[in-house]
Image (cartoon, helix red, strand yellow):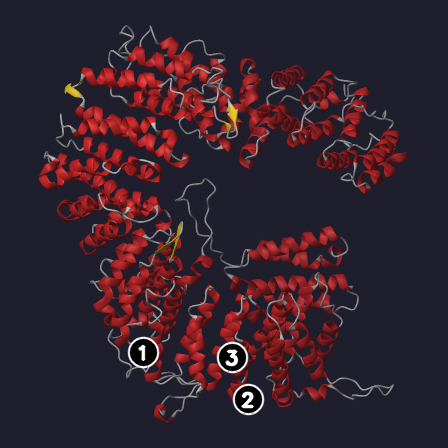
Amino acid sequence: MQSQLNQHHFRIRVPRGLARLKRRRTRVDMENGAEGDEAVCVLGGFADADSTESRVLIAGLPGAHLVDKDREKAAERFLFIMDKYQEQPHLLDPHLEWMLNMLLELIRSEQSPPALVHLAFKFLYIVSKVRGHKVFMQLLPHEVSDVHPVLDLLCRQNPKDHETWETRYMLLLWLSMTCLIPFDLSRLDGHLTTETGKAREPIMDRILAIAKSYLTVCDSSRDAASILVSKFVTRPDVKQKRLGDFLDWSLTLVSQTDDLTMDGTVVLDGVLQSLAQLFKHGKRDDLLLYASTVLQCLDKRRLGDSNQTVLRKLGIKLVQRLGLTLLKPRLAKWRYQRGSRSLAENLCQPTTRTTEQLEPNMENGDLEPAGQEEDYNIPEEIENVIEQLLVGLKDKETIVRWSAAKGIGRVTGRLPMELADDVVASVLECFSFQETDNAWHGGCLALAELGRRGLLLPSRLPDVVPLILKALMYDEKRGACSVGTNVRDAACYVCWAFARAYDPVELKPFVTQIASALVITTVFDRNVNCRRAASVSIPQRFAVLCPQGTFPHGIDILTMADYYAVGNLSNCYQTISVCIASFPEYTKSMIDHLVTTKVNHWDRAIREQSTKALHNLTPQAPEYMAETVVPQLLTMATGMDLHGRHGAILACAEIVHALYQLSAANVRPVTDFLSADSVDELKGIHQKVSLCRLNFVCFGGELMRPAVCSLIEKMSLSRIPFHNDAILSGWQWLIDDSLKSLHLFSSGAKQVIKESAVSALSALCREYYQVQPDVADPDMQERLVTQYIAALKSPEVLTRCGCALALGSLPQFMIRSKLQQILEGLQETCKITQKDVTFAEARRDAATAIAQVCATAGVSTQGSPDSFLCLNNVTQVYSALLDCMNDYTTDSRGDVGSCCKRMMCCLAQQAAEKIDRCRAHAGTVFLHLLHSQSPTVPHIPHREELLAIFPVDKAETLNWKAPSEAFPHITQLLRLPQYQYHTLLGLTVSVGGLTASTVCFSSQSLFDYLKGIQRDRHALEQFAATVLQIFRDHLSNDRVFIPLLKMLDQMLARGCFDAFTGEENHTFCTDILALCKEGMKRSKDVQKLRSSIAVFCGLIQFQGEVRKKVLFQLLLLLCHPFPVIRKTTASQLYEMLLMYDDVVDPVVMDEVMTELSDTNWLSDLTTVRSHRNQLCDLLGVQRPTVVTKVND
């Protein structure tokens, strides 16, 4: 039994504090891009390899600090090792001591130069940052003998040196620990006069001066200085002499410093931090005398009106500490306590508890019992404190509200019950719809803090729970977005806190409401963080303690809607919602929420997901859907709200279709579910919407046209008895008008309208345009086919697209006897003419339609070309599709012809391209043609070699979209002569592309092939000839030319043509040089010019006169009109001369390198030209001559 409890306990543990859950999110493995491939990364300890490497890095610091590169490399590597333990820093605890000892040994050594000391302190800071300064600083040595060395070293630091701030930060922390020695600091002063008779400053004053000076710096040392103040000023000997003076100094700065300047903000930040730390760690008896004065100073300063978030936060933090100082530290006897935090102990004890059974623990000496509540006078200043904290709950920044909420909880815990209840009432006033979302968020945080601390008594739950339920649904439209995500997240935190603060018996009257609200938020909230917060907020404690029903089906819901499952919005709406709705307690509440809140949501994606969810939920409550939900939606469908109309029409369509599927399974008509009035209203939606023309134009049309088309489709699929009804003509008009008016709508809506209209047409034809089974209505067939073929010649490209896809969607009986006519129209649309060269989308959709029409018509070898794909028309179909593969039409969107290639990408070039979807489709079709057996495709070149490369058993498992799998196979085609040109052409675009993964795997596969043919002179020369041929064929095609230059640069850098470099003036080098010069002539494309420079630098390795020609081209580019080209050329020429040391005479090498590095190549051409000519003389290259333009 105990082991089972431990398993349950481990499984349901969640991070504490839902608002901070995002920072605790575990790492996931997304290597393959799959949403479900998530792996939790939990470390078991400080790895041996990390420990060993850390020791080596620390031990190597004396050598590493000498060179900037080594010093930076060591620090980066150590930071990388430590960062792995950011989420589990406790794993470092057993190793902190030896790390600290090794680093302190370097710091204390007299032989350590300042650079080494700073580097050691940087390592110390990295460890402190990961483990946390509160834990790490306790390990720092704090003997009496450490005070003077630490203080002296800190005094020698330069506060303005931005390179060594880690040293100052760690020294301040170290000094704050040495201040804890129990001896009076005056004992460390010795004689305060030196041998020369000059007075020496006491150590107490030195430390205080250091602390004050660092409170006003602009780096992290300011934070460490505030810690030093809290430790130092609260010492018994210091507080007697310096506490009052320090507070006077601090309040003077607070009063006189201007927060409108950056320097003023920094000063106020440091002073307020130190005061907050002082009142936090100091004893109440010592600070009580000054609390009122400090509070009055803050009131006059009005930090709450500051524009600086950090100052408002520190002001709230300091105010709450002042309030805690003014109140006696005690535990309120009246507070609610739920007992042990251990799940096992709670199971062994009665679940019903009272406050009398559980007395507070008084072991803490700073706390005193609240037995004399009536005699305890509350200072007047507390009202001011609470008022400022309540105002802080409404601040515009989350960190300020969070600090105020914690302050409310802390201060309320020291108040009598009556005053505490007044505070709760004031917090509840934040939940007014007149308040902003900031007030709601702050109120939720405050309620969570009060609940966690037992300060929100169960008697207040009837007032609180309804407000939290409203907060869980809080969502207000603001312009093009909404606010309320933080409110809903905080409301989930409240539920999480309440579940752990109260016994299940206390929450039992509200658990059904809370459960439904949390489940709805878990599944249907728009924001992923809110869904996850609600998921982990479901009261696991109730589910485990009371499995009989306190939280209905809690364990099952926890299992199916866990933190990771709710990460995908579509999965929540379409899968998880169905599983949870199978529990009757949640079914209707989920449906009602979708209908009342989500169907009319401002976000279109949410409306569409909601309608799909209603479709899936219909089988859970079909009668409720038909009798209650559909009438509500029909009213919304013709209402005034555009979003409501859109969502309601889509929802009606989905529900009707779901009801049809249920009735069809029972061999019943859908009208058995729907009443006659509902059917009539469904039919009348189109007519009522059409009455207002604005519903189908502009933004209204972008929403209503797809919605009504979806309704037409679903009504047709549901076989509603509207045959020969007049409504059909109205539906057909809407479909036709939508396809012809696509150009009137925004780019984002065009595709949706087109797809919905095409889908509606297909369903409408199948249900209502048959005079008998598989026999088309001849009038409608002639009208539709003629109309759509004629529209393929429209001057509007989108009209062509829509009508082409409309032809492709026609059912078989509508195509019969019209196939040849349809194919001829589509083939004509696929052709590229001068008039419509930019109509790539139309050619794409026409090619898609050809494939669809052929698949619908079917194959009959000897059949009629008007009805089947046969011998008489198959050739023209293949011809049209293969012609599409030569469509490389480009515009501002890039290769817009790539969509056409998807249809018949059967060549190796397409299988080696950079576009994943294109490559995948090409590879799939390529293998299908290769392995086809019924019938076998004849005349495939190198069939046997191809079968060896692509065996049948691997064809189905090869993932063409993954570059790591595709390119190692496709590059093997380079050894087949008939495939080499096209394969290399495709690889050129991939190797020279931009996508990192594609470039990496394609280039690696290509270089592996080249490495294998280095000893085969014939194969290497053939490959070089192919490269040159591609170069010549695409000199004016930047789509290929620029990637080819990048590929050449990589091949030259890797020595792929080393077999040619030893020969004098090899033709490959001279040809490449000539082609590069021709391709970049008069070019203003910076990318092309930069790529050419890289190739020129690679060609320098070839021997002979060609080297002089390459140098001439590079020196010519040093005076290019574009400054960026001049700078790039100089930089790459410098690197090239370092790599190939035989290019320049060693006598002038230093002078050449100095000239290249010291010259400002971005200056004017006259200045640059003189330096370039000097380089020409040094390198023995002819000076280029300036050509003067002569104007006629």
Q: Which residue position is annotated with label 1? A: 336
Q: Nearer the viewer, residue 765 or 415?
A: 765
For the residue marked with disc 2, what is the amino acid?
Asp
Q: Earlier in the sequence, mark 1 or mark 2?
A: 2
The reply to whether residue 933 is in sight is: no
Q: Which quadrant of the structure image shows residue 499?
A: bottom left
Residue at image coords 20%, 52%: 587
Query: Which residue of the protein is positioned furthest toward the bottom in this rendering?
Result: 375
Cα gap from disc 1 to disc 2, whole angstroms: 32 Å
Closer to the eye: label 2 or 3: 3
Residue 365 at x, y percent in the picture = 46, 87
Front residue (pair 946, 828): 828
Tell us which disc is closer to us: 1 or 3: 3
Q: Amino acid at mark 3?
A: Asp
Q: Identify the residue shown where x is 34% and y is 29%.
A: 741
Q: The residue under label 1 is which amino acid type?
A: Tyr
Real-space CA distance between mark 2 and mark 3, rounded to the nearest whole angstrom = 22 Å
Residue 1164 rendering spot, x and y as whole percentages: 79, 38
Secondary structure under badge 2?
helix
Camera-side residue of 1095 and 818: 818
Q: Secondary structure at mark 3?
A: helix
